[in-house]
Every structure is written in C-alpha cells, then in structure tokens.
Image (cartoon, rainbow, N blue to C red):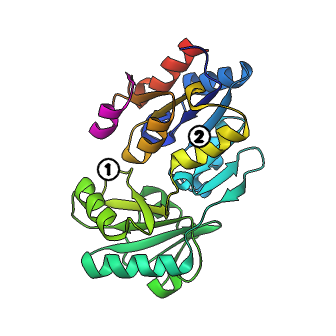
Amino acid sequence: MTCPRLVATDLDGTALRTDGTISPRTAAAFAQVEEAGGTLVFVTGRPPRWMHTVAGAVRHRGLAICANGALVYDLHTEEIVESHLIAADILEECVARLRRHVPDLTFSVEYEGGFAHEADYPLGGWDARELSFGRELAISALTARPCAKLLAQHPSMDPDELHRGVVEIVGDIVTPTHSSGRALIEMSAHGVTKATALATLAEERGIKPAEVVAFGDMPNDLPMLTWAGTSYAVANAHPDVLAAVDHVTAANNDDGVAVVLETLF
C-alpha cells in the first residue's frame, strides 16, 4: 500500500511488550510516522489513568482513544478532550439484567476521573498495584452517575462464552466487548467502539478509511480493524482477530507493529 495518512494501533498485546513497555524500536517507528507527516493514534481499552507512562514514552505526541472509544485523550496535555458516557439509568438497568441472569458477576466502573469497584470485585494487576485510584462502593453508588466503561467479571466462565451471553442480555443498551483473556467484559455506551471514535477523528482530518492502517490483537479491536482500509494482527492475536484481518505481522514481543511501520515509512 501507499504510505498511510493515519496509523491506529492498540497498545496492550499489540504495540506494547508483554511487560507493558514500549521497546526502543517501536518508539522509533512511531516517531517515523509523525516525522513523515502521518497521524498516529493509540486506540486502547485502557483508561486515561493508565496512559501516563505511554505518553512519556512517545514524548507526549498525538491523541489516544481510550476506554474502547468512550474517551479521547490528548497525550500532550494528558487531558480528556471528548467523552461518550453510559448514562446512569442505563448503567442501573444493565447491572440489574446481568445480575438477574448471571448472578456470579461482580462489577467495576471507569469514570472520567477515576475507578470504583464492588468490594468482592477481583482487581487485576494494574489496579491491585494502584489501589489509591480505586474505591469500594455498593452497586447503587457505582451506577449513580455516568461512566466511560462498565466492567463485569466472572470467576470461571470462558471469556468468549461470557461475551456472547452478555451481548444477548444487554447488547441492546450497551456495547460489550472483551480484551484481557479473562472472563472480564467491558461495556461502553451503545454504539461506541474503537471504530466509531477513530472514524470521527479521521473524518475531522479529511482522512478516508482507505488511508488508514490499523493494528490489534483482541476482539475489542475488531470494529477498528474491519473499518480501516488495511488491517494487521500481531501473531499472538485472538483467533477471531487473526481470521478477520488482511495481514499478520510478528508478535508483540517481537516488535510486530514496528516491523510493518519501518516498511511503510
């Protein structure tokens, strides 16, 4: 393909190493994109509170689409510049339906400015290390105000099976996806995905889907990968992603994104 005008890449499991770092090779490839006049956008399930290290590694360049499309985050100022939130009444209805049909679920919520969780919600690695960012709240308090992302975790179900069930139960009022490899479902406002936020950003800049190359590894990347004119999965990607993309590059730990960008730019 010709040199793309926009490069969109997922972070965890795609552009980042398994230890969460950006390799020097990948950082240099990102710099190449901008030096060539391209637009670089990180499109991630991460909340903004997990973006400080990434912002520093890329010298505070560009924009990030966070929380699976719910938040647009300026890496230069480290501020949220656009939000698409789940309304409080929808949150309450969503939790009520899921608790009725899948009683073993526990919930947490990403707000624009922080994180809160039920007392029995199992915290993952990042949140277990950063407890100061989270608060234990009763479910009625969790759902009392709009949020960027509702998370539901099950102690034992297969992630793909859980996702299918959640889509059947609440897919008419929120957009569920998953990305962690655990039985952890991430829900955004209805119709909000990585692709919707990226498409808006591209349109504002006069960039067509055919001028975009995108990289990903998990089901939450599928809307973005199918929207972009050219799509790549890293070799370690989920089977559904590997089946959907145009191309497969090396694994995240082998700088697969950088391998492609060095060729394109």
Instruction: Point out residue 139 in the picture as x, y percentages from the top left corner.
Output: 45, 83
Of helix, strand and loop, which one carries label 1? Answer: loop
Q: Which numbered disc flags the more N-terminal residue, 1 or 2?
A: 2
Q: Nearer the viewer, residue 86 or 122?
A: 86
Name the kind of residue labelled 2 in the image. Phe
Report the mark closest to the observer, 1 or 2: 2
Task: Please report the residue visible at 41 percent of the width from the left and 65 percent of the height from the top.
Answer: 123
Tally of marks: 2
Of helix, strand and loop, which one carries label 2? Answer: strand
Q: Is residue 169 above or below residue 47?
A: below
Instruction: Point out residue 21 in the picture as x, y percentages from the top left corner.
Output: 52, 37
Location of the C terminus (image quadrant): top right
Would residue 10 be counted in the magenta stretch?
no
Instruction: Point out residue 177 in the picture as x, y percentages from the top left corner.
Output: 39, 55
Q: Quadrant of residue 2?
A: top right
Would residue 240 be counted in the magenta stretch?
yes
Name the kind of residue labelled 1 in the image. Gly
Tell which residue pokes out farthest to the right in this image: 77
Q: Is residue 210 above or below residue 90?
A: above
Q: Nearer the viewer, residue 142 or 8?
A: 8
Q: Which mark is residue 25?
A: none
Instruction: Point out residue 209 in the picture as x, y percentages from the top left corner.
Output: 57, 32
Q: Label 1 belongs to which residue?
A: 181
User: Is 98 left or right of 252, judged from the image as shown?
Assistant: left
The reply to whether callout 1 and callout 2 are in contact (CB within 8 Å) is no
Q: Label 2 belongs to which residue?
A: 42
Cα gap from disc 1 to disc 2, whole angstroms? 20 Å
Task: Please report the residue visible at 61 percent of the width from the left and 62 percent of the height from the top.
Answer: 84
Task: Please report the residue visible at 63 percent of the width from the left and 29 percent of the height from the top.
Answer: 6
Q: Which residues are magenta?
A: 236-248
